[in-house]
Amino acid sequence: MCRVKLLDGSAWTRAIKGPFLGVCRMRPLTLEDLIPLPEFQARRKEYLSSHLRYIESYRKIRIGQRAVLVFENRQTLWFRVQDVMHLARIHDEPTQLLELELHNRVLPLEGGLQGALLLDGHLPPGDPTSSTWGDLRGDHLQLMLGGKRAVSANLLTTRQEDRCWGTAHWVHFRLDDQELRLLADNRESISVRLRTGDYDGLSLPLTDGVRQSLVEDLAGMQAAA
């Protein structure tokens, strides 16, 4: 079982033997994780409310006035894939398996964090943010770890059609053991910075709840549950 907790004082607590990287991997969603579509439809409002609360409390980071970073994991993905199957009325198993395969690509790679970088709101014509957003590079987005390390993102949307005018990019952060320890150490201030063109946004320090959720992703907590 993989288990990582935020540091309390000077004690680093984690139930992992050996090096962190390569020990645990987040499990993909399978058909066994899904509930029947009629049950989901009957309780969709309840599930949606719970999903949004979870995103706001543990997965969403505002970077300046316009940008938002939302980290993905099995819990966030579960609602989205259930909702797609509900809206598209996908009942046959082969198509459900195809949807699961496509959505599971959003899950973090081993030793990393993965999510969507979004622009909050509509970009009006001529807004200078639209051109700089299309030219976004991974090193424009950084996870700032206690003033000691800055981890640049790997921009997964690198095709021309992905990088054209739009309001979303998929990003991935790869962290080593030392960077994980900084993320988990509540004595260190952790934030996210986005600098591209005229935009320079810095998030507020991540809360303990957000950091614990991200550390659990990296340690494979969802896979071990």
Image: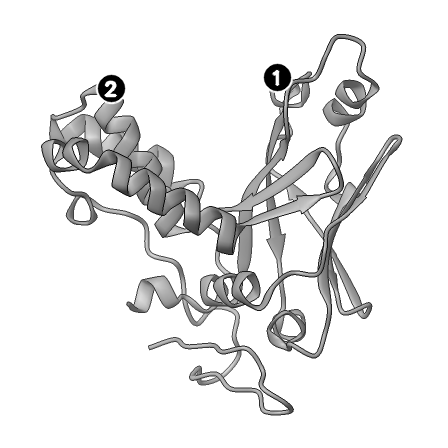
How crowded pointer 1 is (Cα within 10 Å; few <14, some 14-19, many 20+) is rated as: few
Name the residue type under label 2: Ala
- Position of 11 with respect to 100 (left or right) is right
Name the residue type under label 1: Glu
Q: Earlier in the sequence, mark 1 or mark 2?
A: 2
Q: In which quarter of the image is residue 85?
A: top left
> At 72% from the left edge and 55% from the top edge, which residue is drawn?
204
Residue identifier under label 1: 161
> At 67% from the left edge and 69% from the top edge, which residue is drawn?
179
Report the disc number at residue 88. Answer: 2
Residue 140: image location, x then y, percent: 79, 42
Residue 13: image location, x then y, percent: 51, 86
Distance from Cα at disc 1 to Cα at disc 2: 25 Å
Asked whether the residues under the numbered discs 1 and 2 touch, taking CB atoms below 8 Å apart as contact, a structural biologist would say no
Q: Tag 2, which secondary structure?
A: helix
Q: Tag 1, which secondary structure?
A: helix
- Position of 223 with respect to 5 (left or right) is left
> At 20% from the left edge and 49% from the top edge, which residue is drawn?
33
Q: In which quarter of the image is residue 143?
A: bottom right
> At 87% from the left edge and 30% from the top edge, which residue is drawn?
197
Residue 31: image location, x then y, percent: 17, 43
Q: Is residue 188 above or below residue 101?
A: below
